[in-house]
Image (cartoon, grey):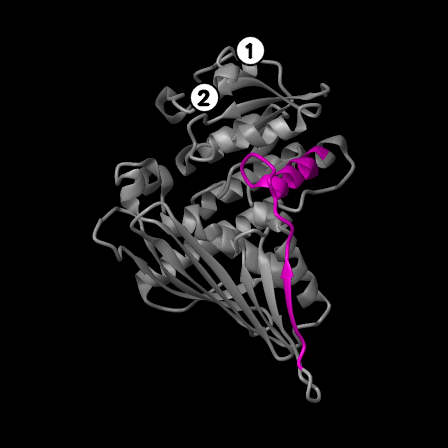
Amino acid sequence: MTSPLKIAFIGVDNPHGAGWRDLLANLKTEFQLSALVPHFDGSIASLEEKYSDLPRYETVTELIANAQFDAAIVAVSNRYSADVIEELAAAGKHILAEKPVAGRTVDAERIRQAVDSAGIAFQTGYMWRYDDCANRLKRMIAEGRFGKLISVEAVYATSDVNRRGPAHYLFDVNESYAGFFSWLACHHIDLVQYITGQAVKAVTSRVGNFTETSVAVEDGGTAILDLDSGAIATLIGGYWMPRWSGEVRWTIRGSKRWVYWDPSKPDTGGSLEIHGPQPQWYAMEETYDAPVDSTPGYGGGPGVELLEDWLAMIRGDVETCRNTTESMLTTVRVVDTILQASEEGRRIDL
């Protein structure tokens, strides 16, 4: 293992590609970008000039055969992710895979098998697991401060299909297999299970095209997830806003308290509005504002923590990252089930 670790970047023009590269720059003494595989038909429109002289390879096979590197960031479309990760894992390269990692359960199972068999360090791009407010909510639930968990309600609406254009690979069923639930709602599907510490045991859903622009994948919808404890999680959202914009908010309700989470509250790093019990005449009311995060790069401070967690696994300091092959597979399976439940018009048990 070199110091700093030499990192190959696969998928230069991924929508988050430049953000990942900016994030790496926060840890210059730990990571060194050393080689590129453009992917996306060779496009490098977003490539920064400071990386323009790095060795470039057309395929992962060429990369492995010719470049000296320890690990790879994989940011390719769902269509290619399993093939790319299998090849890297077989070569013993540590892997950080952009979410959702895979577009279908069968591919996620291939990835888990390849990574686990190789014994390499594996991390995914589910950065919300490193968010301050998310982890405070997780701790509240684990410590029983919600009492009996009743419901989780998550909203995630963002810019419509026309912002990128219907021809973008994210809306191409052959490249992505699914739409909004695979690319964006996957964050909340993963996070519901992480924060509550519970598995999804059944799914009911309705997804499809709800805007004026039709694409071959779903532009959004709603899903009801039954959790182990009997609590329900409701997710609603889509590519529904007619400009570059986003709306994200959560409500968690329990028998002892309820909390509104606004991850985008101005001048904060996210905010929790906490409403607690009123045993006598005085009710517990509190607002927690996380500190403003000005860290550059994709995901900011949580993104840096994610990279540090991956580095710790590579060094053998921790057994697994906070994201694992199993958590990745579980999220992909839930996405698949949401699509199936909507198509078949029924509740499906997992």
* Residue found at the very far bottom of the displayed protein: 280
* Residue found at the very far right of the displayed protein: 317
Say which quarter of the image contains residue 123: top right
Residue at image x 31%, y 36%?
Answer: 168
Specify the amino acid type for callout 1.
Asn
The quarter of the rendered structure image containing the N terminus is: top right
Q: Secondary structure at mark 1?
A: helix
In the image, residue 21 sits, relative to residue 126, either above or below, namely: above
Q: Secondary structure at mark 2?
A: loop
Can you identify the residue that label 2 sits on?
47
In the image, residue 270 sits, relative to residue 99, either above or below, namely: below
Residue 289 on the magenta segment:
yes
State the image coordinates of residue 117 (x, y, percent, origin top left). 64, 36
Residue at image x 40%, y 69%?
Answer: 347
* Alpha carbons under labels 2 and 1: distance apart: 21 Å
Specify the amino acid type for callout 2.
Leu
Q: Would residue 30 appear left or right of 80 to someone viewing this image?
A: right
Q: Would residue 122 appear left or right of 234 to someone viewing this image?
A: right
In the image, residue 277 sits, relative to residue 138, either above or below, namely: below
Residue 189 on the magenta segment:
no
For marks 2 and 1 on the same chain, the one whose residue lies earlier in the sequence: 2
Closest to the observer, 329 or 46: 46
Mark 1 neighbour density, 10 Å: few (under 14) some (14–19) many (20 or more): few
State if disc 1 and disc 2 touch (CB < 8 Å): no
Can you identify the residue that label 1 sits on?
66
Q: Which residues are magenta?
A: 283-311
Residue at image x 60%, y 63%?
Answer: 272
State the image coordinates of residue 146 (x, y, percent, origin top left). 65, 73
